[in-house]
Image (cartoon, rainbow, N blue to C red):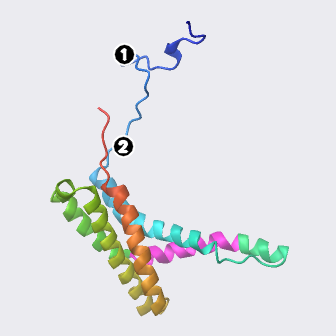
Amino acid sequence: MALPVPLSRFTSRVGGGSAFFVRLLIAMTNTRRILMELLLPPLLATALTVVASFSTWPFGDSLVESVIAVIAFPIGCVGLLFFAYLFSAIPSLIYTLVMEVWFRAGLNARFGFCCTAGLSSLLGAGAGFLTANIGAWLGFLTSPDCGRLTILGAIVGLLSGFYIGKKQVSAA
């Protein structure tokens, strides 16, 4: 049975005309991995905090209060992100140094993906605890925040470890 559209419209004209499209994966370079280790955890922690706050964030009773809340919300998110990077500068550097030692020593290949994600989660919990204590020492956070940020740090560390620790296959 003949197809109404020739196969050449769906296949590549280079490489033998395979019917499969292979997406090129971007290899995780050292520079990209270090940037992800430094910048991803505070951003992800802020995003998770904002998403969690939707369940407890009340809109105003009137239309004016609701509009003000919707306008003020993005401004508050930017402020939260700023403080996340400010308070987590030292913990992010420690996290990055430990993870880089892990990768440079080849331990991710030796112990595998799950151990890399587990180490990242453990470091994330420590970073969350340290970030909370820095914030409490400066007077911005209270004691209950330390426990919450430790748990949040472990979750963020696990998610970051899954992203940073995955094997990137280069399409050659």
Residue at mark 2 to residue at mark 1: CA–CA distance: 23 Å
The type of residue carrying mark 2 is Ile
Label 2 belongs to which residue?
Answer: 26
Disc nearer the start of the sequence (2/1): 1
What is the x, y in percent for residue 172? Answer: 29, 32
Is residue 15 on the magenta stretch? no
Name the dominant secondary structure of the magenta segment. Answer: helix
Which residue is located at x 63 percent, y 72 percent?
A: 54
**Residue count near mark 2 (Cα–Cα under 10 Å), binned few <14, some 14–19, many ≥20:** few
Residue 137 sits in which quadrant?
bottom left
Q: Is residue 87 visible?
A: no
Q: Which residues are magenta?
A: 71-88
Q: Looking at the picture, does residue 75 appear above or below residue 143? A: above
Is residue 76 on the magenta stretch? yes
What is the x, y in percent for residue 154? Answer: 38, 73
Label 1 belongs to which residue?
Answer: 16
Judge depth for marks 2 and 1 and give the one in front.
Answer: 1
Nearer to me, 113 or 149: 113
Q: Is residue 9 visible?
A: yes
**Residue count near mark 1 (Cα–Cα under 10 Å), binned few <14, some 14–19, many ≥20:** few
Nearer to me, 113 or 36: 113
Q: Looking at the picture, does residue 156 appear above or below residue 130? A: above
Which residue is located at x 76 percent, y 74 percent?
A: 68
101 with respect to 42 (left or right): left
The type of residue carrying mark 1 is Gly
